[in-house]
Amino acid sequence: MRRLCVLWLAMAMLGQAIGFAQRSAQAGTAPTVVAAGGMAATPVAPVRVGLLYNRRQATLLAGGSERLVNYVRAITDNGGTICALSPMLTPAETGKLAQSMDALLVPGGDDVAPCFYGEKPDKCLETTDPEFDLYESNVVSLAEARGLPILGICRGHQFLNVWAGGTLWQDLPTQLHAGTNVVHRIENAEGTAQPCYHDLNLKEGTFMFRLFKTQRLKVNSYHHQGVKVLAPRFHAVAWTDDGLVEAFEDDSGKITGVQFHPEKERALDPAFNCIFSDFIQRAGAAALSNARAESPQHDSPAAR
């Protein structure tokens, strides 16, 4: 089933949009002068964070409309710049941008197509974008190959789990029956998700505990899907009272995922900015490490 998805999507990814490519390059090289707390950013060359846009979002971006504004602000407020990536780019353009970035953020969005984790669509499955799923998979693999920090948020958290071999609950309200009163999403009369809140249990000795320094943390929640089987390479670091994994990390600490939306919550509670300040700090360390590895002096006889 996964092979059929890939074969079909390979045919769908032949086109490109020059306008988006130009916009992407501009976004990735624009200087950043503001860091967390309003202080001037100290790096001479701010770190470049890859941010993934689907085709619709990229089309709007090329026309000057930013749909991922909360993610962009969270990155730039902490001293980073945006390297926009989308299936509207050619493979060569994507590869070039992926080689220039220092970290990758996989944002929220549509449901992940269940064919990528070996399931048939559930009746409660919402909008999917298999073309984007495949593109994201390729970009995440490029980032992992370079040892870059990767952060997944909400759908991005779910997608990273699928990318690494895990599975998802396609619809929590109808599939996860844990006998608790945990609410993961509420909607208004128009069917738009509204913020609701629940508590997480944080595991000591993990990145979540290091950042928030507490065993219980109240977070926002907008999702109807979630991690079902956690990929073997990941470790659960936070979960709800109904047992749903809502944050994970890998052994290296370079790949992390959170189910909640810190990019939205940090405007209400500045404590949630720590997710991004830590991410940008790790991106800066990766940039320095890669620069040293790629330096001609690093490979010279004198250096050895």
Image: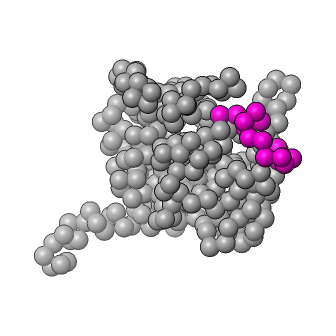
Main SS category, magenta section: loop
Quarter of the image where one finds residue 60? top right
Q: Give the vertical position of 288 relative to 198 (above or below).
A: below
Q: From the viewer's perspective, is 272 left or right of 299?
A: right
Quarter of the image where one finds residue 217? bottom right
Which residue sits at x=74%, y=41%? 176
Residue 174, magenta (yes or no): yes
Q: Quadrant of the C terminus?
A: bottom left
Judging depth in this view, the residue of 163 and 273 nearest the camera is: 163
Which residue sits at x=61%, y=68%? 206
Q: Residue 65 appears at what percent x and percent y? A: 60, 31
Q: Quadrant of the N terminus?
A: top left
Q: Give the vertical position of 63 relative to 73 (above or below).
A: above
Which residue sits at x=26%, y=62%? 294
Which residue sits at x=56%, y=42%? 167
Q: Residue 220 appears at what percent x and percent y? A: 77, 49
**Which range of residues does the magenta coloring cover?**
170-183
Q: Residue 13 appears at what percent x and percent y? A: 38, 24
Residue that sits furthest to the left in the current view:
301
